[in-house]
Structure formats: C-alpha cells, structure tokens
Image: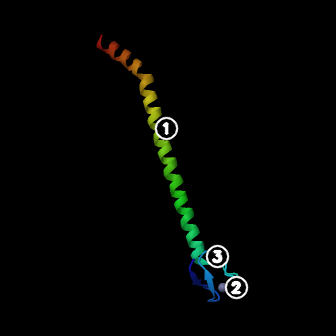
C-alpha cells in the first residue's frame, strides 16, 4: 500500500483510499484504477458474450444444414430428372 499526495490538500493518502482523510477530496489514483477495472470487466463480458453468440450461430447453422440436407437431396434428385 503506497502513500500518494492528495491533489487538493497535498496531504499523504493511501493509494487505496477512496477519499482523502484530511480534506475529503476523492483520490484520483483510486478512481482511475476503479475505472480501469470496470473497463476491463466490461471488455471481458463483451468478449464472453461474443464467444457465446458465435457458438450459438455455429450450432444454429449446423442444425439448419442438418434439417435442410434431405430437402436439398430431394431438390437435386428432381433437377437431375
Ligand atoms: Zn486532501
């Protein structure tokens, strides 16, 4: 746990503190770290959703191919006659 300088009162604050204990100003390093963590979390969730969507698309595509395969075979038979 490092000590950093408060941007408002120049007092020493823990870099994990939300606010300065002396003046009550929000600690920017903590805010930036939380924003970064939130952004990374959002990125991970987006990547997860994308992977799920790709898997669902592949499954639906295969199901559609399996379902339509007999129909296509019949169509090809009819065309060859
Ligand atoms: Zn302060």
Q: Residue at x 56, y 70 (%)?
A: 33
| Vertical order, 66 against 4 (above or below) | above
Q: Is residue 30 above or below residue 81?
A: below
Distance CA(mark 3)–CA(mark 2): 12 Å
Q: Dot 2, how many residues are within 10 Å of its Cα: few (below 14), some (14-19), or many (20+)?
A: few
- For disc 1, the neighbor class at 10 Å (few under 14, some 14 to 19, many from 20) is few
Q: Quadrant of ligand 1?
A: bottom right
Q: Alpha-carbon distance for marks 1 and 2?
A: 53 Å
In three-dimensional space, the C-alpha distance between marks 1 and 3, rounded to whole angstroms, equals 43 Å
Question: Which SS class for mark 2?
Answer: loop
Residue nearest the viewer, comparing 32 with 57:
32
Q: Quick one: SS at disc 1? A: helix
Residue designated by label 2: 23
Residue 66, position in %: x, y? 42, 24
Residue under label 1, please give it. 56
**Outermost residue toward the front?**
1
Q: If you read the primary sequence from the N terminus, does the residue marked by circle 1 or circle 2 appear first?
A: 2
Front: mark 3 or 2? 3
Name the spot of residue 64 as percent of width and height, x first: 45, 28
> Residue drawn at (32%, 15%), measured in percent from left and top?
79
Give the left or right position of residue 35, taking residue 77 as reference. right
Residue furthest to the top in view is: 81
Q: Which residue is mark 3?
A: 17
Label 3's element? loop
The quarter holding residue 61 reads top left
Q: Quadrant of residue 34?
A: bottom right
Local packing at callout 3 (Cα closer than 10 Å; few below 14, some 14-19, many 20+) is some
């Amino acid at each position: 746990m490092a000590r950093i300088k408060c941007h408002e009162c120049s007092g020493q604050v823990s870099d994990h503190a939300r606010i300065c204990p002396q003046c009550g100003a929000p600690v920017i390093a903590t805010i930036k770290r939380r924003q970064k963590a939130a952004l990374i979390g959002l990125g991970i969730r987006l990547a997860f959703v994308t992977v799920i969507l790709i898997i669902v698309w592949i499954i639906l595509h295969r199901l559609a191919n399996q379902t339509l395969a007999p129909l296509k075979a019949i169509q090809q038979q009819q065309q060859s006659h």
